[in-house]
Amino acid sequence: MIPAEFRYLFPSTVDEAVRMLADEGEDAKIIAGGQSLVPVLRMRLAAPTALIDIGGLTELTGVRDDGDSLLIGAMTTHYEVQRDHLIHDHALLLKLVTDTVADPQVRHRGTFGGSLCHADPAGDLLAPALALDAVMIIAGPGGRREVPAAEFFVDYFTTALAPDEILIDVRVPKYTGWGAHYEKLNRVAQAWSIVAVAAAVQVRGGTIEAARVGLTNVGSGPVRAVDVESALVGQPVSAIAEAALRASSGDGYKDNLARVLTGRALTAAVAG
Amino acid sequence: MTATAEPEVGKARLRKEDARLITGQTRWTDNIQLTGMLHMAVLRSPVAHARIRNIDCSRATAMPGVAVVLTGEDFAAEQGSLPCAWPITEDMKSPPAPALAVDQVNFAGEAVALVIADSPYRAADALAEIDVDYDELPVVLDLEEALRDTDLVHPDLGTNKCATWVFDSAEAGSGTNVEDEISSAEVVIERTFRQQRLIPSFMEPRSVVVDPSAGMFTIWSATQIPHILRWMLSAVTGIAEHKIRVIAPDVGGGFGGKLQVTPEELLCLLVARRMGRPVKWTESRTESMLSGHHGRDQIQKITLSARRDGTVTGLKVELLADMGAYLRLVTPGIPILGAFMFNAIYKFPAYRFVCTNVFTNKVPTDAYRGAGRPEATFAIERMMDELAVELGMDPMKIREMNWIKHEEFPFNTVAGLTYDSGNYEAATARAMELFGYDDLREEQARRRADGSAVQLGIGISTYTEMCGLAPSRVLGALRYGAGGWETASIRMLPTGKVEVITGTSPHGQGHETVWSQIVADRLGVPFEDVEVLHGDTASSHKGMDSYGSRSLAVGGTALVHAADKVLAKARTLAAHMMECDEADVEFASGSFSVRGTSTARTLSDVVLAAHVAHDLPEGMEPGMDADATFDPDNFSFPHGTHLCATEVDTETGVVKIRSYVAVDDVGTVVNPLIVDGQVHGGLAQGIAQALYEEAVHDEMGTLTTATFADYLVPSAADLPAFLTARTSTPATSNPLGAKGVGEAGTIASTPAVVNSVLDAVRHLGVRDIEMPLSPERVWTALQGRKADDAGEVAAGGLGSIDAQGGQS
Amino acid sequence: MHISVNVDGVTYADEVEPRLLLVHYLRERLGKTGTVVGCDTGNCGACTVHLDGHSVKSCQMFAVQANGHEITTIEGLARDGKLHPVQEAFRTNHALQCGFCTPGMIMQAIDLLADEPDPDDETVRKGLEGNLCRCTGYQNIVRAVQDAAQRMKPGAGPKIEQHSDEHVTAKQPVGGE
């Protein structure tokens, strides 16, 4: 399968990339790692007139310590996220989720920011971004703006990014010392999740002080299980089983998975 | 010439093929670049059933780099109909099968137009500029619905029913009347199983290059069947057969999927003839899935009668088999290959098999690993479990009391075959021991008692199959269009090196290695001194190619016979050279000697003497080459016992294979490394049918699983380690004693897995689960619901990729 | 567009269409036909090569994206006529049948062993989850990778391509490391 023709642009700064987006109009597209975009282009499900390759923007790679939070460059690859010490220490959930993204080759090319912008509801990184209250830092013609994850994911494959904007950084509050787990159920290793649950918990002396729970592929975007989270605050670890039932109220298969996997994710997060 | 120190047969030789494959020095068809070569791209119908109102090629034709755009009308006079070589009944309905649709398309994926351009990229661009107007027709998808003939796939045929094929043991004289047995039975069990549609999924996409220069058509193709392809292309096009040379270079897997005369092979040939230039076509994976033939797709209604003590008395099989939209090379015969195997290893007194082949607006079906026998084995092994459950007996006990005992071979079966050899007791005993059957049953009981969320199941498959296709007279009786012999030639070169020419056409099996072992043993020459030539009709002019686990049992035997002819002639010449009576000549380790003396001549000496021909016995022709063709007088019957333990997570429906033991009796083993490899790969495909793979068409007839993101071929992370072992009762139908191993793993494993899962959850009220046993289906069954009630299937897949994509 | 790419130790300068997939550049332009295309969607991994020492799917990127980078293919592994230990292990463990997936499988196995020098069965299987094989059932592939790990242990022979991790970290500093 062979993509249609496009013009290829290779900006060297974020500002240049933003300018290019504005100049090229709506049919231009950013390519980051390309691991979701290239198959779409090959199958000619999309045919942008221009691709703006932000692979040269080294300023967008890497993870920085920013006091109470981490700043993750949008172009940081999954492979780098998996091995980053700051993420391991302060946002363990992101590491654990990233470990399950696609396969090793894809994790070498695919990027943290790219996955969020692709906004595939079956994509793994959306739920933890939502659950961990990540904030998207976006560059556009008018300068920079910040959008919380809860407002960023709008619909299937749709984000709050305007056509002339680029995600440059993701701010993630530190969850130092929190237990975390990603419980993913898919049919084969490479397949997208049927349902997956990202959970982080802060436990002190056997009491859950705080919990974050995000669900993958149960709607048009990531879903935060706020009822589960609130049911856990101040409760003993033994309350997990009961609280997990609040992950979904339906009687379909995915509803069942939401409940079962939430229970398992929380239990493992506490144990881990 | 040095003698080989130990026998080659039975030795775990590393493969000769590997040197080029592990270094990338490969010869895939798509690697071929010829000067002036054009590239063919195929526009495929997006709709399953429609009249073609108009095709507008004007914009495409004007695109840069485009040589020509062609439609079915351009070829209507010359493309003929793609061949079906197996008209199973005299009155079988067979619609014309144009390579390029002319005025109607009958499945989504059917070729409707071609772009011929100077590069694949430009061909793809032009393809997007062709406009086709379709008048859509009602689509026929469901087999039972199709039989009502409300809407017709091929209106000219007047029916969707292709053919009905019947075997009845009372009529054949091989058994009693099954209806009598059923009506008088103490126990009757009736079940319906569905064999889902599968896609062969060879890793190398199909590719064809046709070079029309030098007064010949040289065709490279990623095919399993260069010889049959040459014959059929000649028959369809009228091009003289000797003006066609077919080469199957390195071929990346087939599994039956490349046992075909494809539309694209024919079209490349026609285009090359028209343009007078070389033409290449290489498919994308999605094209492969949309247009390469599929496998399985049957509904099986099985009725089994038995006595209360567990003795089986009758078996009635009623099949509906989906042909898809056209009859490809052996489409109608695939279910018939299963007709002789439903009775399996059991002593049924009565048997009746009725198969109705049905047309639908789907991709044509044809051979896929096992071809008919996996379907049969699945059904009977599931039924034996059902009978055990019904009678409250141990599933292994019930098999044991009904199977053919080792002392009963040769055994004439109710389906009319003669099983030559086997020992089901031995294979089963070995499997039970390796598996730890009793311990697992104990654990299973514990988990049931505990009400554990994860339940344990044990699945059994005591299978046999028929392979070594095949005695030509049997194929003739089944109305198959060709024979089942195989041929081999040995060329003894003056330096003592050996060239072997085989009519088999390996595509991963390792014939270069195994054929070398056989010849090295027979002639006493070093393994390294043998070169195997195959897959080129110019060097190997005749052969029946590779499929149906036939290559060793049939082609290997031809090779043994050719070697024996070399030796016979060499013996005569050696006697002449040593001035002794031929009766006094002994041959061992590559050397002839006169009995009781030290006089000796090596085979190499004798070959050289034959080559220079200075002093030959009266009437002897120079040279020491030999040809042999072998037509087996029976099939071969591998068998074995497979045991599978699964853990079923009752909260999520996830199935995990905990252990898998396969004990196979494939007769004499030439290369144990290769045999194990064949079993491993076979198991993976059989397990994949049980748990993962399914070709799904939506209600419009569109294949929704046309990528590897949607059609779930398992990876290493999805499969367990297998424990394999062997028992051996040599086949008596060939001098090697080989039975065949290419399909055994696939045939055996699917029912072992499904029986195992059902064994895990049957006490929770589950009676059956349709394949593949996805987590959702298993969970739904556990809720006591039908699969249809589960609502929309939850999945990711590229079905969910939005055209707009996103930053990625 | 003009690109300069080092492939298997040789630097090539070429004019390419932006849409030219890296795998097609390797196969059609450079004649590196050892690397093959098995699918359209990045699932099969048959096209796996190393980009600056890390495995990538060469059908999932454009040749222009490799501009200024180093590519290693299956054809660049053997040194001085000596096979890479992973190639050797694939042969001795009968880890291939038709061999179509083999180049990608070997390239991914080398990448895996760079990160996991002594992997257990499950680690190998997870590490190869992006590569499909239809012939072997993976059993002998897993065995070959573990066998190669033993061959590649310090003192067990030449260490080729084992340093990709440091190599890349040095080139593209990752925060915190």
Image (spheres, rainbow, N blue to C red):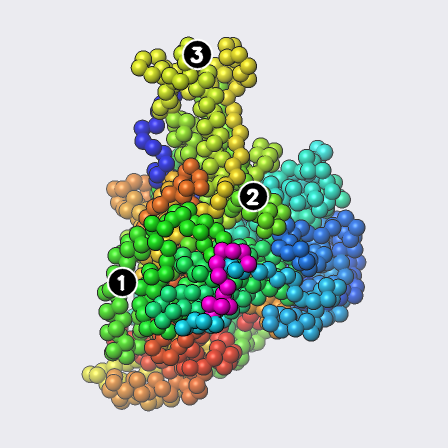
Figure quadrant of the N terminus of chain B? top left
Which label was assigned to residue B437?
1
Q: Is residue B590 above or below residue A149?
A: above
Say whether mark 3 and mark 2 are on the same chain. Answer: yes
Identity of the residue drawn at 72% across and 34% down: B215
The answer for which chain carries disc 3 is B
Residue bearing the label numbered 3: B577
Q: Answer with mark 3 or mark 1, whichever residue precedes in sequence.
A: 1
Horizontal side, residue B766 vs residue C16: left or right: left
Q: Which stretch appears magenta?
A: B171-182
Q: Does B177 lie within the magenta span?
A: yes
Which label was assigned to residue A230?
none
Answer yes or no: do the residues labelled 2 and 3 have beta carbons within 8 Å?
A: no
The answer for which chain carries disc 1 is B
Instruction: Choose mark 2 or mark 3, whichever is in front.
Output: 2
Residue C42 appears in view: no
Residue bearing the label numbered 2: B472
